[in-house]
Image (cartoon, grey):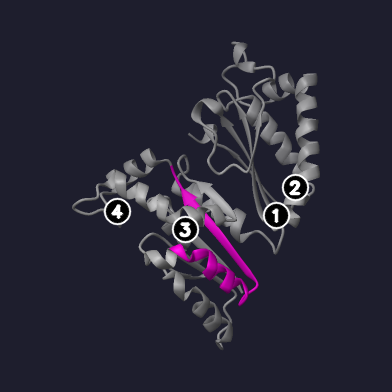
Amino acid sequence: MKLVIISGRSGSGKSTALNVLEDLGFYCIDNLPVALLPSLSTKIQQGKQAIQDVAVSIDARNIPTDLANFAQIIQQLEGIQSKVEIIYLDAHTDTLLTRFSATRRKHPLTGPDTPLLEAIKIEGDLLQHIKEMADLNVDTTHLSMHQLRSIIKKRVVQKQGEEMSLLFESFGFKHGIPKDSDLVFDVRCLPNPYWDPMLRQFTGQDGVIVDFLGKEDTVNAMFADISKFLQTWLPQFQQNNRTYMTVSIGCTGGQHRSVYMAERLFAHYQQSYGNVQLRHRELNR
């Protein structure tokens, strides 16, 4: 039996993620009390009906003392069943405020003396230790509902056994480093097509940019160095029970150099990993 625990701050997309898993055959439970996780696992495995995949969402509506004991409960759970994965969703606070304003939903922790902004902060503090334990952190700030559904489907559901799910993500430093990065590489030292007026309108996915960067020795050297680093250390992470890795490649605006390098690394590592994904954060804006 596989158990996926979805957690994160309200408005980050937990319901969407749980719905994806339910659509794909998972037995799903929303806002299960943390203390009931071991009993649920035992009950399902002892039941007559075969249930292979289970997903539960855990959020700040839980009993605070149970949330505080989350690590101990997970340790107990791992003694009962073979595979537990924790997925934590989050977004920038400003984005969460905008989402609540748009939907006019009530935050579960707001009250007469607790405004929305304070409730969001309190919620983050309550769930921080779950975030730190997560196998996969997903920043949904710049994701649409459809993009989040795709990420959950491709990275969580299509991952086979202990195989590592690898995501290459391009981004622009001027928009901030992705919060869900595991490794970050800075390619701002490479020649920048932006300064050529004839190339500025294109992106790292276009042939003219691929040709421009592909003939540069420094670009090829950077690719070789990043590739060698990943070839050496990804197996070490995997041996340390890491099943998800997000490798972020950044340039200034996230349009040319980082996109090119992420595309090239993605193509290269598709040959050696079965679950490799590609995302261009700034191109999705």
Q: Determine whether the residue tagged by mark 1 lies in a helix, strand or loop.
A: loop
Mark 4 neighbour density, 10 Å: few (under 14) some (14–19) many (20 or more): some
So how many labels did they put on this image? 4
Front label number (1 vs 3): 3
Q: Earlier in the sequence, mark 4 or mark 3?
A: 3
Q: Quadrant of residue 52?
A: bottom right
Give the residue pinned by disc 1: 164
Q: Are the two marked residues, 1 and 3, in contact with CB atoms closer than 8 angstroms? A: no
Give the residue pinned by disc 2: 234
Give the residue pinned by disc 4: 107
Instruction: Write down the region rendered in magenta.
Output: 68-91
Q: Is residue 151 left or right of residue 125?
A: right
CA gap between label 4 and label 2 equals 39 Å
Tell me the quadrant of the picture where the N terminus can be found. Answer: bottom right
Q: Which amino acid type corresponds to the residue marked 1 in the rendered image? A: Met
Give the residue pinned by disc 3: 7
Q: Earlier in the sequence, mark 2 or mark 1?
A: 1
- The residue positioned 38% from the left and 41% from the top of the image is 93
Q: Quadrant of residue 47?
A: bottom right
- The residue positioned 59% from the left and 62% from the top of the image is 85
Q: Which amino acid type corresponds to the residue marked 4 in the rendered image? A: His
Q: Which amino acid type corresponds to the residue marked 3 in the rendered image? A: Ser
CA gap between label 4 and label 1 equals 35 Å
Q: Is residue 81 magenta?
A: yes
CA gap between label 2 and label 1 equals 9 Å
Q: Which amino acid type corresponds to the residue marked 2 in the rendered image? A: Leu
Q: Position of residue 149 (x, y in %)?
A: 50, 53
Q: Position of residue 14 (x, y in %)?
A: 44, 57
